[in-house]
Structure formats: structure tokens, C-alpha cells
Image (cartoon, helix red, strand yellow):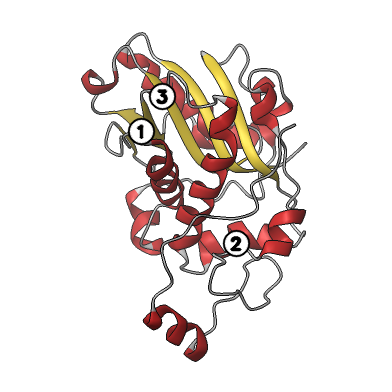
């Protein structure tokens, strides 16, 4: 029987780490309670109660994967947990994207990858492509949250991260308040393939922070498949059910 991974293997806790935890306690990004020295980003209780999708167990036939059927050559798709805008778990993505906590992406990327690798989700995948940010947004935020998630996944899987094969040329505003058709129009033609040779004949894992309509991932994937004979899988931390 498949069991959720509730512990994260960690390096020995140093004296300085323990001292820093005393001086400046780290807090759970879900409930705000103090983390123990062995916990990262999410406390054990909140980890246990994350509304996991378990989509990796049926990686081609699930609600998120269906968004991409007939749009792109999708092989599999999974999200860590269901995303609801005003739920406590939404704090995870809010802190990651808007509160200058890129480390949350890497921690949860590792956590998610460890949970799903036993289901052979990563088998046959050649590399990871984080959904890029436009340069303006990257300057504002200082980091790409999808890249941080990708780093965590790469650390567990050993898959290379292709951070410069596709770029986002324009920033057309946040997708948050837009409807399905507005989201589709908002991302049309904003991505550009810049290094197709390095990904030709590859199975690529696109990583985004949250998937709602799938419009952003589809637009990114359509550029990647221009490289030739490219298969696509998708991974996200959150999935917002319609």
C-alpha cells in the first residue's frame, strides 16, 4: 500500500542551525507555528494534512492531465496538492511567490519528488524545463519560483534543468483574476524557443508552481515541441480544480 512520506531525510543538524532557530525561529508556511530543527518549510502536522491529489498514481488519466489532452503530446501530469485561493495551504504558494522565500520551492520540490519517484513518474524523462518568467517580473521578484521547484526535483532525481531553452518575452499581467479564455489569450505567443537543438528527441518535464486552466503550460509546451520529436510531462505544486 502506498504511504505518504512524512519525513524528509536531512543532513546532521549543526550547532549553528540550532542556534539560529533559537534566535530567529522558522515558521511553518501553512499554519505559522514554529518548526522543529528537523522540519523544513512545512510542519509534520500540516504535511500530514496537505490535500494531496495523488495524481501521480494515474499520471495520464486524471483531472489535471485532461486539460492537456489534444493540446500537446502529454505523457503524464501530477500536482502535489489541491490549491484553493483562501485555504491555509494557499499560504505555501503565496509565501513562495510574493514573500521572498525561494527556499520553499526547493524544499517542496524535493519533498514531492521523493513521494512520487517510487511510482515511476520520472522514468524516461530526459530533463526539466521550469516555466520561465518575463525579465521584468524576474527583476521584481528576484527569482523564478518554478526554477526553485525544479532545483528541488533535480536534486532528488538527478535530472538536468534546462533553464535557457525557452524564454518568456513579455509580461501581460497576473493570471490570477482572469477567466479561462482570458488566460489563454494572455499567454499566446509570449514564449519563444531559443535552443531547440539541446532538447530535440527528448521527453521534457515542465514544472510550474500552480496549474489552473493549463494555458501557461500549453503555451510553453507548444514552443518546446517545435524542437522536434519532443514529449511532455507536467509537474506542479498546486492544482486549482475548476
Above or below, comparing residue 207 to residue 77 in the picture: below
Residue 176, given in percent of the width and then of the height, sits at 63, 50
Query: Is 110 rendered above or below residue 191?
Result: below
Question: What distance separates the C-alpha of mark 1 from that of mark 2?
Answer: 27 Å
Q: On the rendered image, what quadrant is the C terminus found in?
A: top right
- Label disc, if present, on residue 21 of the rendered structure: none
Q: Dot 2 corresponds to which residue?
A: 94
- Would you say 104 lies left or right of 5 here? left
Mark 1 = which residue? 159
Task: Give the CA distance from mark 3 to mark 1.
Answer: 10 Å
Q: CA distance from mark 2 to mark 3?
A: 27 Å
Q: Where 123 sits versus 207, above or below?
A: above
Identify the residue shown where x is 45% and y is 24%: 221
On the question of residue 95 being in view, the answer is yes
Could you classify mark 1 by the number of other residues whose Cα lies within 10 Å: few (under 14), some (14-19), or many (20 or more)? some
Q: Badge 3: how crowded within 10 Å, few (<14), some, or many (20+)?
A: many
| Nearer the observer, 198 or 191 | 198
Mark 2, Cα crowd under 10 Å, few <14 / some 14-19 / many 20+, is some
Judged from the image, the secondary structure of the residue bearing numbered disc 1 is loop
Mark 2 vs mark 3: which is more N-terminal?
Answer: 2
Closer to the observer: label 2 or label 3? 3
- Location of mark 3 (residue): 204
Q: Is residue 128 left or right of residue 183?
A: left
- Left or right: where does residue 32 sit relative to residue 121? right
Q: For the point 33% across and 60% down, which residue is it? A: 139
Amino acid at each position: 500500500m502506498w504511504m505518504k512520506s512524512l519525513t524528509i531525510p536531512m543532513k546532521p543538524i549543526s550547532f549553528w542551525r540550532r542556534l539560529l532557530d533559537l534566535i530567529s525561529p522558522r515558521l511553518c508556511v501553512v499554519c505559522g507555528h514554529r518548526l522543529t530543527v528537523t522540519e523544513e518549510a512545512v510542519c509534520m502536522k500540516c504535511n500530514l494534512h496537505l490535500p494531496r491529489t495523488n495524481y501521480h498514481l494515474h499520471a495520464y488519466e486524471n483531472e489535471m492531465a485532461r486539460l492537456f489532452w489534444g493540446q500537446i503530446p502529454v505523457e503524464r501530469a501530477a500536482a502535489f496538492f489541491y490549491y484553493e485561493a483562501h485555504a491555509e495551504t494557499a499560504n505555501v504558494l503565496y509565501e513562495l511567490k510574493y514573500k521572498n522565500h525561494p527556499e520553499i520551492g526547493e524544499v517542496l520540490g524535493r519533498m514531492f519528488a521523493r513521494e512520487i519517484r517510487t511510482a515511476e513518474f520520472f522514468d524516461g524523462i530526459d530533463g526539466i524545463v521550469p516555466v520561465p518568467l518575463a525579465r521584468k517580473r524576474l527583476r521584481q521578484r528576484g527569482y523564478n519560483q518554478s526554477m526553485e521547484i525544479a532545483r528541488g526535483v533535480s536534486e532528488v532525481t538527478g535530472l538536468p534543468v534546462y533553464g535557457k531553452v525557452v524564454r518568456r518575452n513579455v509580461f501581460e499581467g497576473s493570471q490570477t483574476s482572469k477567466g479561462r479564455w482570458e488566460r489563454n489569450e494572455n499567454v499566446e505567443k509570449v514564449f519563444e524557443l531559443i535552443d531547440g537543438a539541446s532538447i530535440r528527441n527528448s521527453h521534457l518535464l515542465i514544472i510550474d508552481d500552480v496549474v489552473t486552466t493549463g494555458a501557461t503550460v500549453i503555451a510553453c509546451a507548444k514552443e518546446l515541441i517545435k524542437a522536434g520529436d519532443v514529449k511532455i510531462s507536467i509537474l506542479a505544486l498546486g492544482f486549482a480544480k475548476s
